[in-house]
Amino acid sequence: MRTQEGNAESEGNDLLHSQRCLLVSFEEKKDLQKADLEIIKKLELRFKGKDAWPLFRSYQPGYYPWYLNNDEAKFLKICLEQAKDVSLRFKKDPNLFEALQSQSFFVRVQKKSGAAQGWKDTWCKPAPLKRIVIMARTTDEQRLQAIIK
């Protein structure tokens, strides 16, 4: 909830460990793991400069951040392509993100028409939050005392 309200700063890195997400960041070479460097070498990629080395991780609740699997890598590639497309268009038109309605978010949606595929811009409102009521059991004091004895 705090994330949707924009109050997530105080949670720090804990937020990454409580949600499912893919992360790409740019780090110094010394911050990458051996496996990361091996992949970069195998792909014959070259990077120079501070914070120029890409680091890709998959975050899942309850798990240690790990390397991307094949499907995650394909999905992240699409996300980065769309981010590039939108950022280049925003550079030309800074009003691109002017919301048509309040509480709406700019979203890229894949469209299919026959064999042709493409992407379109749209504005979406988030689904309303569902309140979950958790019913707590009352404590059976007599049984608890019997267990303690």
Image (cartoon, rainbow, N blue to C red):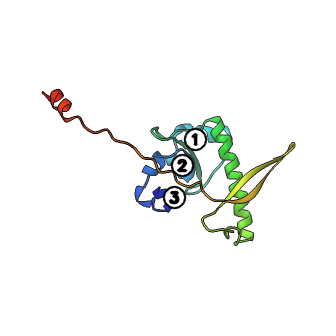
Which of marks 3 and 1 precedes in the sequence?
3
Q: Camera-side residue: 55 or 89? A: 89
SS at mark 2?
helix
Give the amino acid type for the residue marked by disc 1 in the picture: Leu
Vertical order, 135 against 121 (above or below): above
Q: Quadrant of residue 148?
A: top left
Rate crowding at label 1 as few (under 14), some (14 to 19) or many (20 or more) other CA atoms within 10 Å: some
Give the amino acid type for the residue marked by disc 2 in the picture: Lys
Give the residue number, with chain letter if any, for mark 2: 29
Q: Camera-side residue: 23 or 15? A: 15
Residue 34 image position (x, y, % from top left): 53, 38
Q: Camera-side residue: 126 or 21? A: 126
Q: Residue furthest left?
A: 149
Number of the front mark, 3 or 2: 3
Give the residue number, with chain letter if any, for mark 3: 4
Residue 137 image position (x, y, % from top left): 31, 38
Q: Are marks 1 and 3 in contact (CB under 8 Å)?
A: no
102 lies left or right of 146: right
Q: How many numbered callouts?
A: 3
